[in-house]
């Protein structure tokens, strides 16, 4: 039996999944948790790095927190 590693990025959810807006300095952990809960994260954080973009729509906020 094969199980996914808890450290492996979850698969991007379908666009039909309910959206969840996440805002913070780093939203990756919350986004991964949201995907595992069946939600579609929409994120704004300092990084919008590759591992976040694998599972969520994200924008980088360069003037955090004032740029929100």
Image: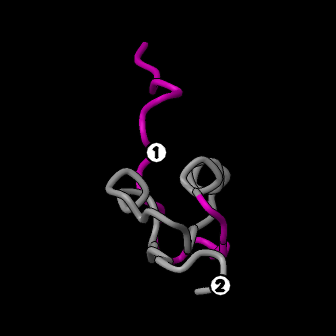
x and y percent of residue 43 in the render?
A: 55, 71
Q: Is residue 28 left or right of residue 11?
A: right
Instruction: Tell me the element at label 2.
Output: loop
Q: Nearer the viewer, residue 9 or 48?
A: 48
Q: Residue at x 43, y 13 (%)?
A: 1
Q: Nearer the viewer, residue 31 or 44?
A: 44
Q: Within 10 Å of the Cα at label 1, are there few (<14), some (14-19), or many (20+) other Cα atoms?
A: some
x and y percent of residue 32 in the render?
A: 56, 49
Q: Quadrant of residue 20?
A: bottom right
Q: Residue at x 66, y 71 (%)?
A: 23
Residue interval drawn in magenta: 1-25
User: Does the magenta portion include 7?
Assistant: yes
Instruction: Tell me the element at label 1.
Output: loop
x and y percent of residue 19 in the render?
A: 63, 76
Question: Which residue reaches farthest left?
Answer: 50
Q: Residue at x 45, y 27 (%)?
A: 4
Quickly name the residue at label 2: 66
Q: Is residue 19 left or right of residue 56?
A: right
Question: Which residue reaches farthest top?
Answer: 1
x and y percent of residue 17 in the render?
A: 58, 71
Q: Within 10 Å of the Cα at label 2, are there few (<14), some (14-19), or many (20+) other Cα atoms?
A: few
Relative to 30, is 21 above or below?
below
Checking the image for residue 10, the label placed there is 1
Q: Residue at x 44, y 62 (%)?
A: 47
N-terminal label among 2 and 1:
1
Q: CA distance from mark 2 to mark 1?
A: 31 Å
Q: Nearer the viewer, mark 2 or mark 1?
A: 2
Checking the image for residue 2, the label placed there is none
Q: Is residue 8 left or right of residue 43?
A: left
Examine the residues drawn in magenta and state their main secondary structure: loop
């Amino acid at each position: 039996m094969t199980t996914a590693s808890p450290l492996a990025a979850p698969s991007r959810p379908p666009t039909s999944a309910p959206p969840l807006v996440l805002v913070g300095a780093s939203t990756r952990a919350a986004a991964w948790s949201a995907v595992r809960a069946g939600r579609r994260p929409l994120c704004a954080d300092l990084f919008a790095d590759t591992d976040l973009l694998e599972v969520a729509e994200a924008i980088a906020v360069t003037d955090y927190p004032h740029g929100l």
